């Protein structure tokens, strides 16, 4: 089975979700699985995720 060596490939896991998540969060597609949940509270905790999203703490989004 060709997919055996990489059954947990991010692309494989996101493939069925692409049509759903693609239009909503295209910027999160290439990121690891833990990233999408972490971005949800970003507006409330922008200072924590600032460096991660590339946005300085307190900067307008």
Image: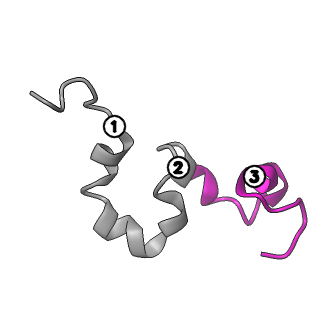
CA–CA distance between discs 3 and 2? 14 Å
Q: Is 57 within the magenta?
A: yes
The residue wearing badge 2 is: 31
Among numbered discs 1 and 3, the one appearing first in the sequence: 1
Residue tagged 3: 49
Q: Do the residues bearing badges 2 and 1 touch, measured as CB atoms within 8 Å?
A: no
Lower position in the chain sequence, tag 2 or tag 1 = 1
Circle number at residue 9: 1
How far across and how far down the image is residue 41, in percent?
66, 59
- Which of the labelled discs sits on residue 23, or is there none? none
Which of 50/42 is in front? 50
Magenta-tinted stretch: 37-61
- Tell me the quarter of the image containing the C terminus: bottom right
Q: How is the image coloured?
A: one colour
Few, some or many residues within 10 Å of mark 1 (<14, 14–19, 20+): few
Report the front residue among 57 and 9. Answer: 9
Q: Secondary structure at mark 1?
A: loop
The residue sitting at 52% across, 59% down in the picture is: 28
């Amino acid at each position: 089975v060709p997919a055996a060596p990489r059954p947990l490939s991010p692309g494989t896991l996101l493939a069925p979700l692409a049509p759903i998540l693609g239009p909503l969060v295209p910027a999160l597609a290439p990121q690891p699985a833990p990233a999408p949940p972490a971005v949800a509270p970003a507006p409330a905790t922008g200072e924590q995720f600032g460096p991660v999203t590339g946005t300085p703490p307190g900067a307008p989004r």
